Image (cartoon, rainbow, N blue to C red):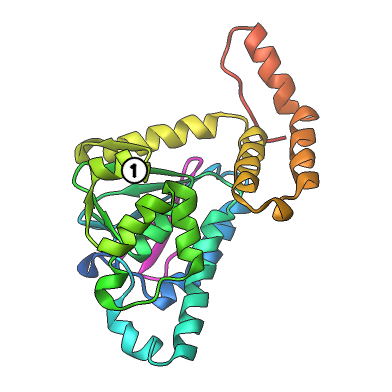
């Protein structure tokens, strides 16, 4: 599936989402934010897909932020800004709510809206030449609760304030020390490393991975928003599954298990 600027493909058990505007460092347009939920939902509903990888085309940028050329049209008034922000929030939230594990494969610039996409993924693996930042204060753009909450959940308020207040770019090693990314690897090894992670996840029991993701997501929510009935149901599905039986049999037979997600 493709919109031209937002591509998707399936390779074995991995669904790929590719931000495809290399001539603009993959800057996100309103149309890309609007199309993103349909692609994520399609992969979530595909039983053959067990992992979703998000990346940018061209090798120079993951996503270098929002498409500033649209600001005059889309953010001319507070009402326009609110509508545009809502579209962006829906796109970002769809990644955070994905049932399947998500990995951001980051090379080059990861700025502004690109940070929102990356931080909405479960894991972030970056190349050594990556750069990170939120330049809202350098552009006079507002930065609201949704974005601040996402940053706080990932790296804490202190580092978040440093990102927002300074507006400067951080290198990959700084991002690693902040906990903004899980791993940093040479650019030549990035794709192979991400594919290895995806393959490792895909080989594991899908119901167990889904239950774990549900539990971690609940831990990040306010206590009043946690659905403990859903958490228990996910645990019960694991206990009653054929995959749990397969895991025990494979362990006793000293072989690798073959999980089917049932």
Relative to 257, is 194 on the left or the right? left
Q: Which residues are magenta?
A: 1-20
**Residue drawn at (22%, 60%), measured in percent from left and top?**
168
Q: Identify the residue position indicated by label 1 in the image.
A: 178
**Residue drawn at (44%, 84%), measured in percent from left and top?**
81
Q: Residue furthest front?
A: 158
Q: Where the C terminus falls, by quadrant?
A: top right
Relative to 15, is 195 on the left or the right? left
Instruction: Please count the marks in the image.
Output: 1
Between 144 and 59, the one lying in front of the other is: 144
Relative to 64, is 182 on the left or the right? right
**Residue drawn at (31%, 58%), measured in percent from left and top?**
163
**Vertically, is 81 above or below 210?**
below
**Vertically, is 137 above or below 104?**
below
Residue 52 lies in the magenta-colored region:
no
Residue 16 lies in the magenta-colored region:
yes
- Label 1 sits on a secondary structure element that is helix
Q: Residues within 10 Å of mark 1 (few under 14, many from 20)?
A: some
The x and y percentages for residue 18 are 37, 58
The dominant secondary structure in magenta is strand
The x and y percentages for residue 114 are 35, 61
The x and y percentages for residue 160 are 38, 55
The quadrant holding residue 234 is top right
The quadrant holding residue 183 is top left
Relative to 248, is 35 on the left or the right? left
**Vertically, is 11 above or below 247?**
below
The x and y percentages for residue 56 are 31, 57
């Amino acid at each position: 599936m493709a919109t031209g600027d937002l591509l998707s493909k399936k390779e074995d058990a991995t669904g790929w989402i590719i931000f495809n505007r290399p001539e603009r460092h993959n800057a996100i347009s309103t149309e890309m934010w609007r199309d993103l939920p349909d692609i994520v939902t399609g992969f979530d509903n595909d039983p053959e897909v067990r992992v979703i990888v998000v990346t940018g085309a061209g090798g120079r940028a993951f996503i270098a932020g929002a498409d500033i050329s649209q600001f005059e049209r889309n953010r001319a008034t507070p009402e326009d800004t609110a509508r545009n922000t809502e579209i962006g929030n829906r796109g970002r939230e769809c990644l955070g709510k994905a049932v399947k594990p998500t990995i951001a494969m980051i090379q080059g610039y990861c700025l502004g809206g690109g940070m929102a996409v990356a931080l909405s993924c479960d894991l972030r693996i970056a190349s050594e030449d990556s750069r990170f930042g939120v330049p809202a204060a350098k552009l006079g753009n507002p930065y609201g609760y949704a974005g601040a909450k996402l940053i706080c959940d990932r790296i804490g308020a202190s580092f978040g304030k440093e990102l927002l207040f300074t507006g400067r770019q951080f290198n990959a090693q700084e991002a690693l020390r902040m906990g903004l990314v899980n791993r940093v690897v040479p650019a030549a090894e990035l794709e192979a490393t991400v594919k290895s992670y995806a393959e490792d996840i895909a080989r594991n029991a899908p119901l167990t991975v889904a239950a774990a993701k549900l539990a971690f997501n609940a831990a990040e929510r306010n206590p009043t928003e946690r659905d403990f009935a859903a958490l228990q149901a996910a645990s019960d599905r694991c206990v009653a599954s054929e995959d749990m039986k397969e895991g025990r049999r494979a362990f006793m037979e000293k072989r690798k298990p073959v999980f089917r997600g049932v």
